[in-house]
Amino acid sequence: MDMDAQGRKIVLDGYDNISLDGLQEEMCSLLGLQCQFIMDTRQRPFGGSECIIVVLEDEEGSKWAVRPLQFRAFPEHVVMTVKREAELRLAIEEAGIAGITELKAFSATFDNPARFPFLVSEWAEGTQLRWTESYPPLPQREKVLRSVARIVSDLLQIQSKEYTATSYITTLINRKIKRAENNKLPSATRSECLDQQGLVAEYLIPDLDDSPCVLIHGDLTAENVIVDEDFNVKAIIDLGFADIIPLQFSACFPNFLTLEFESLHEPVEVEHGSGINGPLVWRSRNTEMMRRDWEFYLRCVEELSRGHPMLEAYYKLLAAEDEIKRYWWIMAATKLKIKKLAAKVKELEETRKTDHPDRFGAVARQPGEYVANERFLNLNLVSAVADILP
């Protein structure tokens, strides 16, 4: 992502397509108040993975985050994305869920003074979370993890019965197979898509097939968590990747505990297999602090789940020994650019278990109990595979 040290966009793809004067005019009309750009965001907007964010302040002193979305996407997709996020945000507000910035207004059309669809939400005062192996200190990082776990668990209250897990995953894979057959999926062959289809029976959990679909944030990066100086979580922002998906596919850890985890330790590189583009290289920053964060986050989810059958099922999915393999199979089966990943997970896991038995020490357990050493053998395989993600 092209950002400066303050999280401001450096390369503004499509930014010149937006009429900033028109955006300001539209904001004044929506609010019924005069407003102006602040924080130098007219020239140096904040950036998200698929958007820019400008901040305006009205004459009463309220601050508003205005977010045009996805400059490079097809116009129809931009409109659909804005409408979908607005729908989900309204559902969150109706459920009374705290910790998500309130939606003020939205415009799901290019036919407005700004010449671009956008969403307006309250501005979250604070700073974007920074998360490394040594920062924040232990008490503060536990405070953050506890708050994030609560918000994630609360979002699961937003549910629907749109489809079963089987229909969801088979529909997505079949779409990819069709694209591959029509040579519209350059990153995978039809055979590779069929391989993912063949793993459905292995990874699907029949007992949860008819469970409700639940809301996930979809992009829990550190930059989407806003904290104050005492590390109280003020808000989680940017629901651009939020979606309602089957419960059994919803369980995953925040990105800042996995792909984005920052460590001063040099990542360990492991090569495995070969192919047209050479061996797959895995980079792991698996550290003691990273493992501790995962364990604490799991405990928070477990505490929040007590007495709630759906949340208890979510916790069991998250704590399962094969959670990481299932997660990457789901990613490989449903996303466009990482189809080969799930097959490699199983191969590499067997290699690593052979080479490094009991790497994290033996742990006595009862049947069904969470097993740290086995789980983190898997974690060590995929804790930093961001290098192969789009």
Image (spheres, rainbow, N blue to C red):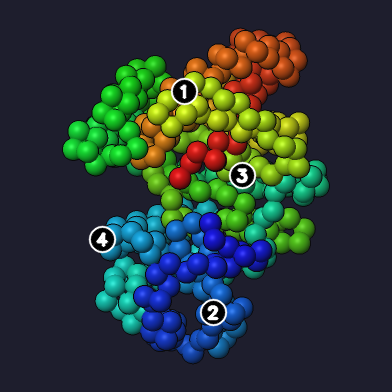
**Contact (CB < 8 A) between labels 4 and 1?**
no
Task: Find disc 1 in the rendering and name its residue.
Answer: 274
- Mark in front: 2 vs 4: 2
Task: Find disc 4 in the rendering and name its residue.
Answer: 76
Q: CA distance from mark 2 to mark 4?
A: 27 Å
Task: Find disc 3 in the rendering and name its residue.
Answer: 260
Q: CA distance from mark 2 to mark 1?
A: 47 Å
Which is more N-terminal, label 1 or label 2? 2
Task: Find disc 2 in the rendering and name its residue.
Answer: 43
Which is more N-terminal, label 3 or label 2? 2
Q: CA distance from mark 4 to mark 1?
A: 40 Å
Q: CA distance from mark 2 to mark 3?
A: 28 Å
Within 10 Å of disc 4 (Cα), the crowding (few <14, some 14-19, many 20+) is few
What is the three-letter code of the residue carrying label 2? Answer: Gln
- Mark in front: 4 vs 1: 1
Which is more N-terminal, label 1 or label 4? 4
